[in-house]
Structure formats: structure tokens, C-alpha cells
């Protein structure tokens, strides 16, 4: 059959078929879309581990830290680019993204937001948001960024990044993971004196396991020198005490609203400014 | 006398047959004709297209100029970095408005070529796995995620085809073969094109190449 086919084709068709085959073999990765949720990641993976190593290396014992908190990029990619450009001008030591890197958690969206964040001229880490779970998004996040709960130390402050998206697991998983929190209270305790808790969805939100809100608050007190909590999710810049007990929660706005917060952490305390861009 | 009768019935054979066919036979014939339209007219195989790394299936072509096609495809998404490989099913509709004969005067034993400069396809793809839901599960508040489903994807594609008509003497299993390509995208990507700033058409389209083997 094949012989017949080629015998009767003109030179043009033969070239066309050849061209298709060459295209098929040479550029498999970029040209063909296998599935929006195929977990086939082009470009950098394992980002958080690499970036945390840089942060810990550079700033483990630094006196004054300037940390930018951004959140909820979704599909506001032009705003996110402007945000990155703005952060780059402000002499920041590192950036924490509080989750919702995507809107529908497709591979492409993960790649788009990652490629924008890679424009930062300082190290960055990113938490997982509830939108990043859709389809096989949590698996994509795990490959691209790493474990869903993670922590690092800079300026003798432990930054504890917690997955609080309990609704995504239908409340069947240990979210927030108290066992992991217990480990983290003691782990590397000689290297840090204070703690900042970072999460995507705050207590009493539609994603938090609200049955354990108060238990969660109790656990936070076991962390050395608890300073404050930072969260995203609500697309709103908020400063609030969810428990009316002096523990401040800072809500970081979404990219579309074109503002974020920079924390300046000194040995005596910290200052927070809201930055508009 | 006898010869005369025979010749008369032979010349008027259609009439004779009609009168001879019983109601039952007519009904059966109609039934067979109806069911025979369900026999697939072609087999196809294609890569990518947001249906998996490779998909294969059967299809039916119909219409006055066979300008309409319906394909049923089964695809496979390899494991990649996920927990496992996945299967997909696709129901696809194609419309082929024009066809150009490339060598209408070719000799019978050489085979003819058609070029179809445009194919329009719309297809619904479903992916199997507990990670995907067809509509938002009850654990979420109403309209929590502002799109329908993570399981079903509606895709659009446009392409072109080159069809080879196998000469009669050389037909074995098939009477024509089409090589086609399609450039398509998925509903989530079209959504990101409108919602997302800075997403260009080039970011969301993908190529698919395939072959169709027609037997009817």
C-alpha cells in the first residue's frame, strides 16, 4: 500500500508527507497539545527547593529582611508582569507568592505564571492555592514547585508555608497538617527565634477546615516568637485579627487589584507597607 | 409462446420484482438499510489535539458530498509526571466545505488525489479519573469555580486534508486514505485568551496530525 501511495504521488506530496513527519519527530514538545491536564511540564521544575536553598544561603543570619508578599495571579498575567517589574525596583530580598498561581490549573497556566515569576531579580517561593488543585493541578504544582507544606529560615525567622485548602480534599485529608506543624516547631530550633505563618486560605474562609480553626490557633502558639500570619485567597488587602487576640493576619490582594505588601523585618520587630503599582 | 413470456418478464424485471417482494421482505430491506448506515465508513488515528498523545477510532461520513463526518476516538494520556496514565474518549464532528481534484484526468491505475483546503471540527473530550469532575461537587459553594467541568473539554480545530483514492485494482481493505492536520484549541484555553491578559493565540493552539482509512 505504502509503495503504491508513494509511487503515485508527485514530488510535491512526497515533500509534504516528509515535512509532516519531520515536524512530527522534531518538535514534539511545543507543537502538540496532549491534554490541558497532562502534567507534562516544559521548563523548570522543583523551584521551591532550589529557591529556598538560595534564600537560606544568602539570608540565614541577615539582620534586616525585606520580603514581598504577592498573591492570586490567576489569569491577570499583564498585571502580574507589572507587579514583578515593580518588585524588582524595590530592593526586596525575596518574594513569597501566597497561592492561586493559575485559574483552572492547566499545565499552560502553571507555565505562564512561572515564567512571569522567573522575571524576578530575587529568589521566590510559591504556595498552592485552591484553584491550583483543579484537575491534576496539585500534581503539576508538586512537580513544578515541590511539597505542598514547606518552610525555610531567613534572618533567624522561620517562614512556615502551610497548605490550608481543605475543601479541595473534601475535608478528608489532614489539612492543615498538624503532625507536620509539630515537627516544624522543633526542627532547626537553634537557627530561628521567630516565626511567620503563611497560607493561601485563612481560617473561617470557604477553604479552611473551619472545625479546627481554634485548634489551629492553639498550635500556632507553640511556634517560637510567633510574629504574624499572611494569607491570600480573598482578593482583598486586609489587616485583621481573626481571633481578636492580638495575632494579626495580613491578607494580600490579587494581581488584578495591583497592590501587594512588603514586610521589613528587623531584630526588634517588623514594618508592613502596602505597595500600589 | 413460452419464449415470448420469458422475454417479456425479463424486460420488465423491476415491475416483476416489486410485485414479488412481500411486505415482510420490504420491511426487512428497509431495516437492513437503516442499520447498515451504522457501519463505520472509516478508521482513523491521530496524535495530540488535547485528546491524548495518540487517539484512534472509527467514524462515519455522510451528506450529499460526504461533507459531514462523525468520529468516535479513544485516546491515551501517558503518565508523564502524574500519578498514572489516563484514557480519554472523544466525539468529534467534522465539516469539509470544499474539495479540489488535483489530477482528474489521471489514468485509472494511477489513483486520483483530492485536496480539501479546509476542515472544521468541534469535539467533546472526556478524561477518565477520580481527579476530574463533570460538574462542581457538592462540597463547594454554588458557582465557586466559574466554569463547567474539569472532565469534559470542548475543543475547536481547523485543518486541511490530502486524500488518495486507491486504484480499483489495488484496493484491499480501503478505497481511499486521507492525511490530515488540524490546528486546534480547548475551551479552557479560549477562556484564558479572553480572561487572561497577555495570552496570545499562539500560546493556546496546538497541532495534530492523523490518517483516515476509508472503506465505504
Image (tube, coloured by chain):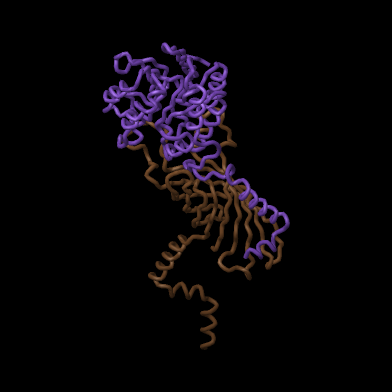
Image mark count: 0
User: Could you say where residue A100 lies in the image, as x and y percent from the top left?
Assistant: 44, 29
Residue A32 is at least partly visible in this image: yes
Shade representing chain A: purple
User: Could you say where residue A51 lies in the image, as x and y percent from the top left?
Assistant: 50, 29
Of all residues shown, which one is farthest toward the bottom? B1
Work out whether residue A19 or residue B171 is closer to the camera in this orientation and state it.
A19
Q: Is residue B130 above or below residue B166?
A: above
Work out whether residue A72 or residue A272 is closer to the camera in this orientation and state it.
A272
Decide if residue A145 is on the left or right side of residue A26: left
Q: Is residue A28 above or below residue B109?
A: above
Residue B154 is at least partly visible in this image: no
User: Could you say where residue B80 lies in the image, as x and y percent from the top left?
Assistant: 49, 46
**Residue A211 lies in what quarter of the image?**
top left
Shade representing chain B: brown
Decide if residue A157 is on the left or right side of residue B122: left
**Residue B113 lies in what quarter of the image?**
bottom right
At a point 72% along the width and 58% down the height, the residue shown is A10
At a point 54% along the width and 82% down the height, the residue shown is B7
User: Could you say where residue B93 lies in the image, as x and y percent from the top left?
Assistant: 50, 49
Quarter the C terminus of chain B occupies: bottom right
Q: Is residue B168 above or below residue B156?
A: below
Q: In this view, does B22 lie above or below B140?
A: below
At a point 60% along the width and 49% down the height, the residue shown is B181
Of all residues shown, which one is farthest toward the right? A11
Amino acid at each position: 500500500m505504502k509503495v503504491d501511495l508513494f509511487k503515485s504521488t508527485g514530488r510535491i506530496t512526497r515533500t509534504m508527507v516528509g515535512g509532516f513527519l519531520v515536524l512530527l519527530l522534531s518538535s514534539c514538545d511545543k507543537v502538540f497539545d496532549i491534554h490541558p491536564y497532562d502534567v507534562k511540564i516544559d521548563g523548570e521544575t522543583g523551584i521551591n527547593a532550589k529557591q529556598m536553598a538560595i534564600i537560606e544561603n544568602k539570608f540565614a543570619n541577615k539582620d534586616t529582611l525585606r520580603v514581598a508578599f504577592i498573591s492570586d495571579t490567576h489569569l491577570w498575567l499583564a498585571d502580574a508582569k507589572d507587579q514583578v517589574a515593580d518588585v524588582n525596583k524595590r530592593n526586596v530580598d525575596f518574594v513569597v507568592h501566597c497561592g492561586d498561581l493559575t485559574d483552572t490549573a492547566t499545565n499552560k497556566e502553571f507555565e505562564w505564571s512561572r515564567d512571569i515569576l522567573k522575571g524576578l531579580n530575587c529568589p521566590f517561593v510559591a504556595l498552592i492555592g485552591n484553584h491550583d488543585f483543579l484537575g491534576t493541578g496539585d500534581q503539576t504544582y508538586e512537580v513544578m514547585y515541590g511539597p505542598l507544606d514547606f518552610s525555610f529560615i531567613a534572618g533567624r525567622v522561620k517562614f512556615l508555608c502551610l497548605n490550608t485548602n481543605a475543601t479541595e480534599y473534601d475535608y478528608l485529608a489532614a489539612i492543615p497538617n498538624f503532625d507536620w506543624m509539630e515537627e516544624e516547631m522543633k526542627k532547626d530550633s537553634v537557627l530561628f527565634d521567630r516565626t511567620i505563618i503563611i497560607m493561601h486560605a485563612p481560617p473561617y474562609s470557604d477553604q479552611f477546615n473551619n472545625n479546627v480553626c481554634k485548634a489551629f490557633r492553639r498550635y500556632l502558639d507553640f511556634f517560637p516568637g510567633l510574629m504574624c500570619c499572611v494569607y491570600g485567597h480573598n482578593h482583598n488587602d486586609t489587616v485583621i485579627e481573626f481571633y481578636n487576640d492580638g495575632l494579626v493576619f495580613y491578607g494580600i490582594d490579587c494581581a488584578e487589584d495591583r497592590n501587594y505588601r512588603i514586610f521589613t523585618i528587623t531584630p526588634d520587630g517588623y514594618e508592613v507597607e502596602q505597595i500600589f503599582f | 409462446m413460452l419464449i415470448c413470456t420469458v422475454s417479456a418478464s425479463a424486460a420488465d424485471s423491476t415491475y416483476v420484482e416489486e410485485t414479488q417482494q412481500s411486505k415482510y421482505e420490504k420491511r426487512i430491506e428497509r431495516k437492513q438499510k437503516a442499520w447498515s448506515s451504522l457501519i463505520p465508513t472509516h478508521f482513523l488515528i491521530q496524535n495530540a489535539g488535547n485528546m491524548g498523545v495518540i487517539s484512534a477510532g472509527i467514524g462515519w461520513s455522510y451528506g450529499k458530498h460526504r461533507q459531514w463526518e462523525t468520529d468516535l476516538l479513544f485516546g491515551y494520556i501517558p503518565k508523564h509526571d502524574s500519578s498514572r496514565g489516563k484514557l480519554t474518549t472523544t466525539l468529534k464532528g467534522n465539516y469539509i466545505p470544499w474539495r479540489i481534484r488535483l489530477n482528474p484526468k489521471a489514468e485509472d491505475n494511477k489513483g486520483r488525489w483530492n485536496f480539501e483546503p479546509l476542515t472544521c471540527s468541534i469535539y467533546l473530550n472526556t478524561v477518565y479519573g477520580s481527579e476530574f469532575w463533570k460538574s462542581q461537587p457538592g462540597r463547594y459553594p454554588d458557582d465557586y469555580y466559574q466554569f463547567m467541568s474539569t472532565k469534559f473539554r470542548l475543543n475547536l480545530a481547523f485543518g486541511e486534508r490530502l486524500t488518495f483514492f486507491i486504484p480499483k485494482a489495488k484496493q484491499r481493505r480501503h478505497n481511499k486514505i486521507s492525511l490530515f492536520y488540524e490546528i486546534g484549541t480547548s475551551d479552557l484555553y479560549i477562556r484564558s485568551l479572553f480572561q487572561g491578559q497577555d495570552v496570545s493565540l499562539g500560546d493556546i493552539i496546538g497541532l495534530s496530525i492523523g490518517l483516515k482509512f476509508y472503506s465505504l
